[in-house]
Protein backbone atom coordinates (compact mmCIF):
# COMPACT_ATOMS: atom_id res chain seq x y z
CA UNK A 1 0.00 0.00 0.00
CA UNK A 2 1.44 3.38 -1.01
CA UNK A 3 1.93 5.73 1.92
CA UNK A 4 -0.72 8.44 1.79
CA UNK A 5 -0.13 11.69 3.62
CA UNK A 6 -3.05 13.34 5.41
CA UNK A 7 -3.02 16.92 4.09
CA UNK A 8 -4.25 19.95 5.95
CA UNK A 9 -6.96 21.62 3.87
CA UNK A 10 -5.26 24.95 4.63
CA UNK A 11 -2.36 24.99 2.15
CA UNK A 12 -0.54 27.72 4.08
CA UNK A 13 -0.28 25.57 7.18
CA UNK A 14 1.54 22.81 5.29
CA UNK A 15 5.34 22.45 5.23
CA UNK A 16 6.72 24.98 2.78
CA UNK A 17 9.34 23.95 0.20
CA UNK A 18 11.04 26.73 -1.75
CA UNK A 19 11.43 26.32 -5.52
CA UNK A 20 14.70 27.65 -6.96
CA UNK A 21 14.59 27.51 -10.76
CA UNK A 22 17.85 27.39 -12.70
CA UNK A 23 16.45 26.98 -16.24
CA UNK A 24 18.11 30.23 -17.28
CA UNK A 25 21.52 29.20 -15.89
CA UNK A 26 22.09 25.42 -15.65
CA UNK A 27 19.23 24.87 -18.15
CA UNK A 28 20.99 27.04 -20.70
CA UNK A 29 24.11 24.86 -20.26
CA UNK A 30 22.22 22.09 -22.13
CA UNK A 31 24.31 21.34 -25.22
CA UNK A 32 22.97 23.42 -28.11
CA UNK A 33 20.58 25.56 -26.06
CA UNK A 34 20.97 29.32 -26.20
CA UNK A 35 18.16 31.62 -25.14
CA UNK A 36 18.09 35.15 -26.53
CA UNK A 37 17.92 38.03 -24.01
CA UNK A 38 14.24 38.59 -24.85
CA UNK A 39 13.49 34.82 -24.47
CA UNK A 40 15.11 35.00 -21.04
CA UNK A 41 13.02 37.98 -19.96
CA UNK A 42 9.85 36.23 -21.13
CA UNK A 43 10.86 33.01 -19.33
CA UNK A 44 11.63 34.96 -16.14
CA UNK A 45 8.14 36.52 -16.27
CA UNK A 46 6.56 33.09 -16.73
CA UNK A 47 8.52 31.59 -13.84
CA UNK A 48 7.59 34.49 -11.60
CA UNK A 49 3.92 34.30 -12.68
CA UNK A 50 3.65 30.61 -11.82
CA UNK A 51 5.04 31.20 -8.33
CA UNK A 52 8.71 30.19 -8.51
CA UNK A 53 10.41 31.68 -5.45
CA UNK A 54 13.98 32.17 -6.75
CA UNK A 55 15.19 32.44 -10.36
CA UNK A 56 18.86 31.88 -11.12
CA UNK A 57 19.03 34.36 -13.99
CA UNK A 58 22.58 33.56 -15.11
CA UNK A 59 26.31 33.77 -14.48
CA UNK A 60 27.10 37.48 -14.93
CA UNK A 61 30.90 37.13 -14.93
CA UNK A 62 30.81 34.63 -17.80
CA UNK A 63 30.34 37.24 -20.56
CA UNK A 64 29.29 40.82 -21.22
CA UNK A 65 26.04 39.59 -22.82
CA UNK A 66 25.23 37.35 -19.87
CA UNK A 67 25.88 40.26 -17.50
CA UNK A 68 23.57 42.62 -19.38
CA UNK A 69 20.80 39.98 -19.60
CA UNK A 70 20.95 39.26 -15.85
CA UNK A 71 20.86 43.02 -15.26
CA UNK A 72 17.84 43.40 -17.57
CA UNK A 73 16.00 40.58 -15.74
CA UNK A 74 16.80 42.14 -12.35
CA UNK A 75 15.49 45.48 -13.64
CA UNK A 76 12.09 43.92 -14.44
CA UNK A 77 11.31 44.11 -10.69
CA UNK A 78 9.50 40.79 -10.74
CA UNK A 79 7.88 39.44 -7.61
CA UNK A 80 10.62 36.82 -7.25
CA UNK A 81 14.18 36.67 -5.89
CA UNK A 82 16.72 37.07 -8.71
CA UNK A 83 19.95 35.18 -8.16
CA UNK A 84 23.29 35.35 -9.99
CA UNK A 85 26.01 32.68 -10.00
CA UNK A 86 29.62 33.47 -9.03
CA UNK A 87 32.82 31.48 -8.68
CA UNK A 88 34.53 32.04 -5.33
CA UNK A 89 36.37 35.12 -6.55
CA UNK A 90 35.58 38.75 -5.72
CA UNK A 91 35.29 39.87 -9.38
CA UNK A 92 32.47 37.37 -9.95
CA UNK A 93 30.63 38.51 -6.84
CA UNK A 94 31.07 42.14 -7.95
CA UNK A 95 29.54 41.35 -11.35
CA UNK A 96 26.50 39.86 -9.62
CA UNK A 97 26.12 42.89 -7.36
CA UNK A 98 26.55 45.31 -10.28
CA UNK A 99 23.90 43.38 -12.22
CA UNK A 100 21.48 44.16 -9.39
CA UNK A 101 20.65 40.61 -8.23
CA UNK A 102 18.98 39.99 -4.86
CA UNK A 103 20.95 36.82 -4.13
CA UNK A 104 24.56 35.82 -4.88
CA UNK A 105 25.20 32.10 -5.39
CA UNK A 106 28.89 31.36 -4.80
CA UNK A 107 30.34 27.93 -5.45
CA UNK A 108 33.65 26.13 -5.01
CA UNK A 109 34.60 22.50 -5.74
CA UNK A 110 34.98 20.41 -2.58
CA UNK A 111 35.50 16.83 -3.80
CA UNK A 112 39.10 15.63 -4.02
CA UNK A 113 38.91 14.97 -7.77
CA UNK A 114 37.62 18.47 -8.53
CA UNK A 115 39.85 20.24 -5.98
CA UNK A 116 42.98 18.61 -7.40
CA UNK A 117 42.15 18.77 -11.10
CA UNK A 118 40.25 22.04 -11.42
CA UNK A 119 41.28 24.58 -8.76
CA UNK A 120 44.38 22.80 -7.38
CA UNK A 121 43.60 23.61 -3.75
CA UNK A 122 43.71 21.62 -0.52
CA UNK A 123 40.62 21.08 1.60
CA UNK A 124 41.97 23.58 4.17
CA UNK A 125 42.42 26.22 1.44
CA UNK A 126 38.87 25.61 0.24
CA UNK A 127 37.51 26.13 3.77
CA UNK A 128 39.45 29.41 4.09
CA UNK A 129 38.37 30.68 0.65
CA UNK A 130 34.76 29.80 1.48
CA UNK A 131 34.77 31.89 4.66
CA UNK A 132 36.37 34.86 2.89
CA UNK A 133 34.16 34.85 -0.20
CA UNK A 134 30.90 34.33 1.65
CA UNK A 135 31.81 37.17 4.06
CA UNK A 136 32.61 39.43 1.09
CA UNK A 137 29.38 38.50 -0.71
CA UNK A 138 27.35 39.01 2.46
CA UNK A 139 28.85 42.49 2.87
CA UNK A 140 27.25 43.35 -0.46
CA UNK A 141 24.08 41.24 -0.64
CA UNK A 142 21.32 40.29 1.79
CA UNK A 143 21.08 36.77 0.49
CA UNK A 144 24.05 34.50 -0.15
CA UNK A 145 23.73 30.89 -1.22
CA UNK A 146 26.87 28.77 -0.92
CA UNK A 147 27.40 25.60 -3.01
CA UNK A 148 30.00 22.93 -2.25
CA UNK A 149 30.35 21.73 -5.84
CA UNK A 150 30.43 17.93 -6.18
CA UNK A 151 29.18 17.63 -2.60
CA UNK A 152 28.01 14.05 -3.11
CA UNK A 153 31.61 12.95 -3.84
CA UNK A 154 32.96 14.83 -0.80
CA UNK A 155 33.36 13.24 2.64
CA UNK A 156 30.72 14.23 5.19
CA UNK A 157 33.28 15.59 7.74
CA UNK A 158 34.86 17.81 5.05
CA UNK A 159 31.43 18.98 3.91
CA UNK A 160 30.41 19.89 7.44
CA UNK A 161 33.61 21.94 7.83
CA UNK A 162 33.13 23.84 4.60
CA UNK A 163 29.40 24.47 5.16
CA UNK A 164 30.09 25.57 8.74
CA UNK A 165 32.65 28.08 7.44
CA UNK A 166 30.02 29.37 4.99
CA UNK A 167 27.31 29.67 7.63
CA UNK A 168 29.66 31.39 10.11
CA UNK A 169 30.60 33.87 7.38
CA UNK A 170 26.93 34.71 6.85
CA UNK A 171 25.57 32.34 4.14
CA UNK A 172 21.78 32.49 4.27
CA UNK A 173 21.46 29.08 2.57
CA UNK A 174 23.74 26.22 1.61
CA UNK A 175 23.34 24.04 -1.46
CA UNK A 176 24.22 20.34 -1.77
CA UNK A 177 24.88 19.68 -5.45
CA UNK A 178 24.96 16.17 -6.87
CA UNK A 179 27.08 17.62 -9.66
CA UNK A 180 27.65 14.44 -11.66
CA UNK A 181 24.39 12.71 -10.73
CA UNK A 182 25.92 9.77 -8.84
CA UNK A 183 23.76 9.91 -5.71
CA UNK A 184 20.95 7.46 -5.09
CA UNK A 185 17.81 8.29 -3.11
CA UNK A 186 19.05 6.44 0.02
CA UNK A 187 22.48 8.07 -0.24
CA UNK A 188 20.90 11.51 -0.57
CA UNK A 189 18.67 10.86 2.39
CA UNK A 190 21.67 9.84 4.50
CA UNK A 191 23.73 12.87 3.40
CA UNK A 192 20.99 15.42 4.09
CA UNK A 193 20.13 13.56 7.31
CA UNK A 194 23.76 13.99 8.45
CA UNK A 195 23.92 17.68 7.50
CA UNK A 196 20.50 18.77 8.77
CA UNK A 197 21.33 18.85 12.51
CA UNK A 198 24.59 20.75 11.83
CA UNK A 199 23.23 23.42 9.48
CA UNK A 200 21.07 26.15 10.99
CA UNK A 201 20.16 27.77 7.61
CA UNK A 202 18.16 26.72 4.55
CA UNK A 203 19.39 23.49 2.92
CA UNK A 204 19.03 23.50 -0.83
CA UNK A 205 19.71 20.59 -3.24
CA UNK A 206 20.77 20.60 -6.89
CA UNK A 207 20.65 17.15 -8.52
CA UNK A 208 21.86 16.15 -11.96
CA UNK A 209 20.24 13.38 -13.95
CA UNK A 210 23.18 11.28 -15.23
CA UNK A 211 21.55 8.07 -13.98
CA UNK A 212 17.96 9.30 -14.35
CA UNK A 213 17.62 9.88 -10.60
CA UNK A 214 17.68 13.68 -10.31
CA UNK A 215 14.04 14.05 -9.34
CA UNK A 216 14.08 11.00 -7.03
CA UNK A 217 17.23 12.28 -5.28
CA UNK A 218 15.72 15.74 -4.87
CA UNK A 219 12.59 14.22 -3.36
CA UNK A 220 14.66 12.08 -0.96
CA UNK A 221 16.53 15.18 0.15
CA UNK A 222 13.21 16.88 0.94
CA UNK A 223 12.14 13.81 2.95
CA UNK A 224 15.38 14.08 4.92
CA UNK A 225 14.86 17.76 5.73
CA UNK A 226 16.01 19.88 2.76
CA UNK A 227 13.99 23.11 2.50
CA UNK A 228 14.73 24.18 -1.05
CA UNK A 229 14.89 22.40 -4.44
CA UNK A 230 16.82 23.46 -7.52
CA UNK A 231 15.01 22.48 -10.69
CA UNK A 232 14.74 23.33 -14.37
CA UNK A 233 11.71 23.32 -16.64
CA UNK A 234 11.66 20.02 -18.59
CA UNK A 235 14.73 18.94 -16.61
CA UNK A 236 17.09 20.58 -19.11
CA UNK A 237 20.67 21.30 -18.02
CA UNK A 238 24.30 20.27 -18.30
CA UNK A 239 24.72 16.75 -19.83
CA UNK A 240 21.58 14.73 -18.94
CA UNK A 241 20.04 17.71 -17.18
CA UNK A 242 18.66 18.49 -13.74
CA UNK A 243 15.63 17.62 -11.64
CA UNK A 244 12.43 18.51 -13.48
CA UNK A 245 10.33 21.35 -12.08
CA UNK A 246 6.93 19.80 -12.81
CA UNK A 247 7.74 16.30 -11.51
CA UNK A 248 9.46 17.59 -8.39
CA UNK A 249 6.67 20.01 -7.55
CA UNK A 250 3.93 17.44 -8.12
CA UNK A 251 5.58 14.86 -5.84
CA UNK A 252 6.10 17.48 -3.15
CA UNK A 253 2.53 18.75 -3.45
CA UNK A 254 0.51 15.64 -4.25
CA UNK A 255 2.41 12.85 -2.50
CA UNK A 256 4.03 14.72 0.42
CA UNK A 257 1.25 17.28 0.87
CA UNK A 258 3.74 20.13 1.20
CA UNK A 259 3.23 23.58 -0.27
CA UNK A 260 5.52 24.93 -3.01
CA UNK A 261 3.43 27.98 -3.87
CA UNK A 262 3.56 26.93 -7.55
CA UNK A 263 0.44 27.40 -9.68
CA UNK A 264 0.54 23.79 -10.78
CA UNK A 265 -2.22 24.27 -13.35
CA UNK A 266 0.33 26.26 -15.40
CA UNK A 267 3.00 23.54 -15.51
CA UNK A 268 2.13 22.16 -18.96
CA UNK A 269 2.00 25.65 -20.46
CA UNK A 270 5.42 26.42 -18.93
CA UNK A 271 6.90 23.16 -20.21
CA UNK A 272 5.68 23.93 -23.75
CA UNK A 273 7.13 27.41 -23.57
CA UNK A 274 10.59 26.06 -22.69
CA UNK A 275 10.35 23.40 -25.43
CA UNK A 276 9.66 26.20 -27.88
CA UNK A 277 12.53 28.41 -26.70
CA UNK A 278 15.07 25.61 -26.18
CA UNK A 279 14.16 23.58 -29.27
CA UNK A 280 14.12 20.48 -27.03
CA UNK A 281 10.81 18.64 -27.06
CA UNK A 282 9.80 16.53 -24.08
CA UNK A 283 9.18 12.90 -25.05
CA UNK A 284 5.43 12.12 -25.22
CA UNK A 285 5.77 9.63 -22.35
CA UNK A 286 7.50 12.20 -20.09
CA UNK A 287 5.79 12.31 -16.67
CA UNK A 288 3.36 15.11 -15.79
CA UNK A 289 3.87 17.34 -18.84
CA UNK A 290 4.42 14.82 -21.68
CA UNK A 291 1.74 14.57 -24.35
CA UNK A 292 0.69 11.09 -23.19
CA UNK A 293 0.90 11.68 -19.43
CA UNK A 294 -2.90 11.37 -19.17
CA UNK A 295 -3.67 9.44 -22.38
CA UNK A 296 -5.20 5.98 -22.37
CA UNK A 297 -5.13 3.51 -25.22
CA UNK A 298 -5.84 0.03 -23.95
CA UNK A 299 -9.45 -1.05 -23.81
CA UNK A 300 -9.28 -2.00 -20.12
CA UNK A 301 -7.73 1.32 -19.11
CA UNK A 302 -10.09 3.44 -21.23
CA UNK A 303 -13.12 1.64 -19.88
CA UNK A 304 -11.80 2.19 -16.35
CA UNK A 305 -11.16 5.90 -16.69
CA UNK A 306 -14.50 6.51 -18.42
CA UNK A 307 -16.09 5.02 -15.29
CA UNK A 308 -13.72 6.58 -12.73
CA UNK A 309 -10.47 8.31 -13.69
CA UNK A 310 -8.69 7.12 -10.52
CA UNK A 311 -8.78 3.54 -11.80
CA UNK A 312 -5.81 4.09 -14.10
CA UNK A 313 -4.45 7.48 -13.04
CA UNK A 314 -2.80 8.51 -9.77
CA UNK A 315 -5.98 10.32 -8.69
CA UNK A 316 -3.97 12.59 -6.37
CA UNK A 317 -2.68 14.21 -9.57
CA UNK A 318 -5.35 14.91 -12.17
CA UNK A 319 -4.73 16.38 -15.64
CA UNK A 320 -6.55 19.56 -14.60
CA UNK A 321 -4.15 20.05 -11.67
CA UNK A 322 -1.20 20.42 -14.07
CA UNK A 323 -3.01 22.09 -16.97
CA UNK A 324 -3.21 18.89 -19.01
CA UNK A 325 -6.08 16.94 -20.58
CA UNK A 326 -7.20 13.36 -20.39
CA UNK A 327 -7.29 11.78 -23.84
CA UNK A 328 -8.56 8.45 -25.08
CA UNK A 329 -6.24 7.29 -27.82
CA UNK A 330 -6.91 5.08 -30.79
CA UNK A 331 -4.49 2.27 -31.47
CA UNK A 332 -4.15 -1.46 -31.66
CA UNK A 333 -5.22 -1.89 -28.01
CA UNK A 334 -8.33 0.26 -28.31
CA UNK A 335 -11.58 -1.04 -26.83
CA UNK A 336 -15.28 -0.62 -27.56
CA UNK A 337 -15.94 1.73 -24.63
CA UNK A 338 -13.47 4.34 -25.82
CA UNK A 339 -14.69 4.17 -29.43
CA UNK A 340 -18.35 4.36 -28.36
CA UNK A 341 -17.56 7.34 -26.12
CA UNK A 342 -15.72 9.18 -28.91
CA UNK A 343 -18.39 8.49 -31.53
CA UNK A 344 -21.16 9.61 -29.19
CA UNK A 345 -19.64 13.10 -29.42
CA UNK A 346 -20.62 13.19 -33.10
CA UNK A 347 -23.97 11.40 -32.66
CA UNK A 348 -22.91 8.11 -34.20
CA UNK A 349 -24.03 4.97 -32.42
CA UNK A 350 -22.87 1.91 -34.34
CA UNK A 351 -24.52 -1.45 -33.75
CA UNK A 352 -22.38 -4.35 -32.49
CA UNK A 353 -21.40 -5.64 -35.93
CA UNK A 354 -20.48 -2.13 -37.11
CA UNK A 355 -18.47 -1.61 -33.95
CA UNK A 356 -16.51 -4.81 -34.60
CA UNK A 357 -15.73 -3.58 -38.10
CA UNK A 358 -14.68 -0.09 -36.91
CA UNK A 359 -12.37 -1.58 -34.30
CA UNK A 360 -10.90 -4.04 -36.73
CA UNK A 361 -10.11 -1.21 -39.20
CA UNK A 362 -8.47 0.89 -36.46
CA UNK A 363 -6.33 -2.08 -35.45
CA UNK A 364 -5.39 -2.76 -39.06
CA UNK A 365 -4.14 0.80 -39.57
CA UNK A 366 -2.20 0.91 -36.33
CA UNK A 367 -0.65 -2.54 -36.85
CA UNK A 368 1.03 -0.97 -39.90
CA UNK A 369 2.72 1.44 -37.48
CA UNK A 370 0.48 4.39 -38.35
CA UNK A 371 -1.01 6.74 -35.77
CA UNK A 372 -4.83 6.69 -35.85
CA UNK A 373 -6.37 10.10 -35.20
CA UNK A 374 -9.92 11.08 -34.25
CA UNK A 375 -10.34 12.29 -37.81
CA UNK A 376 -9.45 8.79 -39.08
CA UNK A 377 -12.01 7.32 -36.67
CA UNK A 378 -14.78 9.56 -38.01
CA UNK A 379 -13.93 8.71 -41.62
CA UNK A 380 -14.00 4.98 -40.78
CA UNK A 381 -17.24 5.31 -38.85
CA UNK A 382 -18.91 7.19 -41.71
CA UNK A 383 -17.89 4.48 -44.18
CA UNK A 384 -18.92 1.60 -41.94
CA UNK A 385 -22.21 2.97 -40.64
CA UNK A 386 -23.27 5.14 -43.56
CA UNK A 387 -24.07 7.82 -40.96
CA UNK A 388 -22.69 11.33 -41.25
CA UNK A 389 -20.49 12.84 -38.57
CA UNK A 390 -21.36 16.33 -39.72
CA UNK A 391 -19.96 16.38 -43.20
CA UNK A 392 -17.13 18.45 -44.50
CA UNK A 393 -17.62 21.90 -43.08
CA UNK A 394 -14.49 23.20 -44.79
CA UNK A 395 -13.26 22.05 -48.19
CA UNK A 396 -10.19 23.43 -49.89
CA UNK A 397 -10.85 24.85 -53.35
CA UNK A 398 -7.31 26.06 -54.01
CA UNK A 399 -4.24 27.41 -52.34
CA UNK A 400 -1.42 29.57 -53.72
CA UNK A 401 1.81 30.25 -51.86
CA UNK A 402 4.59 32.68 -52.61
CA UNK A 403 7.88 32.39 -50.78
CA UNK A 404 11.54 33.17 -51.38
CA UNK A 405 14.67 34.47 -49.69
CA UNK A 406 13.72 38.14 -50.20
CA UNK A 407 10.00 38.08 -49.53
CA UNK A 408 7.58 37.45 -46.72
CA UNK A 409 5.93 34.05 -47.25
CA UNK A 410 2.33 34.69 -48.27
CA UNK A 411 -0.54 32.24 -48.78
CA UNK A 412 -3.93 32.75 -50.37
CA UNK A 413 -6.57 30.13 -49.60
CA UNK A 414 -9.93 29.70 -51.32
CA UNK A 415 -12.17 27.37 -49.35
CA UNK A 416 -15.82 26.33 -49.34
CA UNK A 417 -16.96 26.95 -45.78
CA UNK A 418 -20.39 25.55 -45.01
CA UNK A 419 -21.16 25.76 -48.74
CA UNK A 420 -20.02 29.38 -49.15
CA UNK A 421 -16.77 30.29 -50.87
CA UNK A 422 -14.34 32.29 -48.72
CA UNK A 423 -10.92 33.71 -49.61
CA UNK A 424 -8.22 34.67 -47.15
CA UNK A 425 -4.65 35.85 -47.62
CA UNK A 426 -2.08 35.80 -44.80
CA UNK A 427 1.66 36.13 -44.32
CA UNK A 428 3.67 33.86 -42.02
CA UNK A 429 7.11 32.88 -40.79
CA UNK A 430 7.28 30.29 -43.54
CA UNK A 431 5.10 28.72 -46.22
CA UNK A 432 3.43 26.29 -43.77
CA UNK A 433 2.72 29.00 -41.22
CA UNK A 434 1.22 31.31 -43.88
CA UNK A 435 -0.94 28.49 -45.31
CA UNK A 436 -2.30 27.50 -41.90
CA UNK A 437 -3.02 31.11 -40.94
CA UNK A 438 -4.83 31.75 -44.25
CA UNK A 439 -6.89 28.61 -43.79
CA UNK A 440 -7.87 29.53 -40.23
CA UNK A 441 -8.83 32.96 -41.58
CA UNK A 442 -11.54 31.43 -43.79
CA UNK A 443 -13.58 30.02 -40.88
CA UNK A 444 -15.72 32.09 -38.54
CA UNK A 445 -14.95 30.22 -35.31
CA UNK A 446 -11.21 29.77 -35.46
CA UNK A 447 -9.45 26.82 -33.96
CA UNK A 448 -6.17 27.53 -32.20
CA UNK A 449 -3.20 25.46 -33.29
CA UNK A 450 -1.68 24.01 -30.09
CA UNK A 451 0.83 21.51 -31.40
CA UNK A 452 2.38 20.85 -34.77
CA UNK A 453 4.82 18.08 -35.66
CA UNK A 454 6.24 17.16 -38.99
CA UNK A 455 8.40 14.16 -39.75
CA UNK A 456 9.78 12.51 -42.84
CA UNK A 457 8.51 8.97 -43.32
CA UNK A 458 10.72 8.22 -46.30
CA UNK A 459 14.12 9.43 -47.46
CA UNK A 460 15.40 11.98 -49.96
CA UNK A 461 14.34 15.49 -50.90
CA UNK A 462 11.01 14.08 -52.16
CA UNK A 463 10.41 12.32 -48.82
CA UNK A 464 6.84 11.84 -47.68
CA UNK A 465 6.16 14.26 -44.84
CA UNK A 466 3.76 13.20 -42.08
CA UNK A 467 2.07 16.08 -40.29
CA UNK A 468 0.27 15.66 -36.98
CA UNK A 469 -1.33 18.57 -35.20
CA UNK A 470 -3.55 19.39 -32.27
CA UNK A 471 -6.09 22.21 -32.27
CA UNK A 472 -8.17 23.66 -29.48
CA UNK A 473 -11.69 25.00 -29.95
CA UNK A 474 -13.16 27.97 -28.12
CA UNK A 475 -14.45 25.68 -25.36
CA UNK A 476 -10.94 24.41 -24.66
CA UNK A 477 -11.58 20.98 -26.24
CA UNK A 478 -8.66 19.57 -28.19
CA UNK A 479 -8.65 17.48 -31.36
CA UNK A 480 -5.85 15.86 -33.26
CA UNK A 481 -5.58 15.24 -36.97
CA UNK A 482 -2.92 14.12 -39.39
CA UNK A 483 -2.11 14.03 -43.10
CA UNK A 484 0.80 12.85 -45.22
CA UNK A 485 2.14 13.82 -48.61
CA UNK A 486 5.27 14.62 -50.56
CA UNK A 487 4.48 18.35 -50.35
CA UNK A 488 4.69 19.36 -46.70
CA UNK A 489 2.71 22.56 -47.22
CA UNK A 490 -0.22 20.69 -48.76
CA UNK A 491 0.00 17.93 -46.13
CA UNK A 492 -0.07 20.58 -43.39
CA UNK A 493 -3.06 22.28 -45.03
CA UNK A 494 -4.91 18.97 -45.29
CA UNK A 495 -4.18 18.10 -41.65
CA UNK A 496 -5.48 21.52 -40.59
CA UNK A 497 -8.66 21.11 -42.67
CA UNK A 498 -9.21 17.73 -41.02
CA UNK A 499 -8.75 19.32 -37.60
CA UNK A 500 -11.12 22.22 -38.34
CA UNK A 501 -13.74 19.76 -39.56
CA UNK A 502 -13.33 17.88 -36.27
CA UNK A 503 -14.01 21.06 -34.34
CA UNK A 504 -17.18 21.74 -36.32
CA UNK A 505 -18.41 18.15 -36.16
CA UNK A 506 -18.08 18.17 -32.39
CA UNK A 507 -19.59 21.65 -32.20
CA UNK A 508 -22.87 20.25 -33.59
CA UNK A 509 -23.64 18.93 -30.11
CA UNK A 510 -23.73 22.41 -28.74
CA UNK A 511 -25.87 24.25 -31.28
O1 LIG B 1 26.08 21.08 -10.86
C1 LIG B 1 26.60 21.91 -10.09
O2 LIG B 1 27.35 21.58 -9.16
C2 LIG B 1 26.31 23.32 -10.32
C3 LIG B 1 26.80 24.27 -9.28
C4 LIG B 1 27.18 25.57 -9.86
C5 LIG B 1 25.76 24.40 -8.20
O3 LIG B 1 25.62 23.64 -11.25
ZN1 LIG C 1 24.52 21.91 -12.11
Image: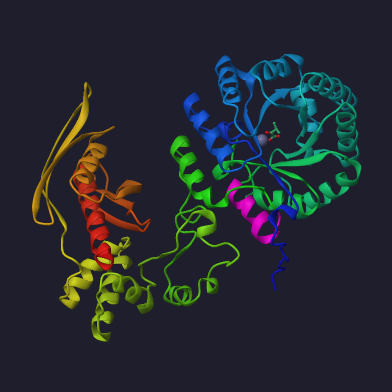
| Magenta stretch: includes residue 424 | no
Q: Residue at x 71, y 45 (%)?
A: 182
Say which quadrant the N terminus sits in. bottom right
Locate residue 464, reporting x and y percent.
23, 48
Left or right of 231: which side holds 224? right
- Which quadrant of the rendered structure holds the C terminus? bottom left
Q: Is residue 439 above or below residue 341?
A: above
Residue 129 x/y as whole percent = 85, 21
Magenta residue span: 245-258
Query: Would you say residue 148 is visible in this rendering?
Result: yes
Between 260 and 289, the residue placed more toward the observer is 260
Q: Residue at x 32, y 60 (%)?
A: 371
Instruction: Work out whether 335 lies above or below 392.
Output: below
Does residue 252 show up magenta in the picture? yes
Q: Indicate the position of residue 72 as horizontal and vertical percent values.
A: 56, 21
Name the quarter showing ligand 2. top right
Return the residue nearer the eye: 351 or 331: 351
- Left or right: where does residue 43 sit relative to residue 505? right
- The image's colouring method is rainbow
The picture places residue 233, in percent across and down from the top left corner, at 56, 42
Report whether residue 33 is seen: no
Does the magenta stretch mainly form a helix, a strand or a loop?
Answer: helix
Left or right? Give the position of 181 relative to 28: right
Considering only vertical position in the picture, is 15 above or below 108? below
Residue at horizontal 85%, vertical 21%?
A: 135
How many marks the image carries: the answer is 0
Above or below: residue 390 compared with residue 445:
below
Amino acid sequence: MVRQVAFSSDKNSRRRITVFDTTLRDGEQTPGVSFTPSDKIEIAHQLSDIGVHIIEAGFPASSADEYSTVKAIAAENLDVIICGLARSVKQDVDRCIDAGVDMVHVFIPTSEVQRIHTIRKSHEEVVAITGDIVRYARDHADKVLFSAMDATRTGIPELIEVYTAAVEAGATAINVPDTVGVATPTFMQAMIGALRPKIPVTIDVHCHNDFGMATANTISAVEAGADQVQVTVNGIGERAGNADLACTVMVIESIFGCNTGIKTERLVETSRMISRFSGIMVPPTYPVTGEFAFSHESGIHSQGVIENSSTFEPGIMTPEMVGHRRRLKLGKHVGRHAVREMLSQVHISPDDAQMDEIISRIKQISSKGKKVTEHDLYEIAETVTGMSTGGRYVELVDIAIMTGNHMIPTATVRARVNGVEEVCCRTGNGAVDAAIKALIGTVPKPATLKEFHISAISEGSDAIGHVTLVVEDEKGRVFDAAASGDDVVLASTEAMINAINMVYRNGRNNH
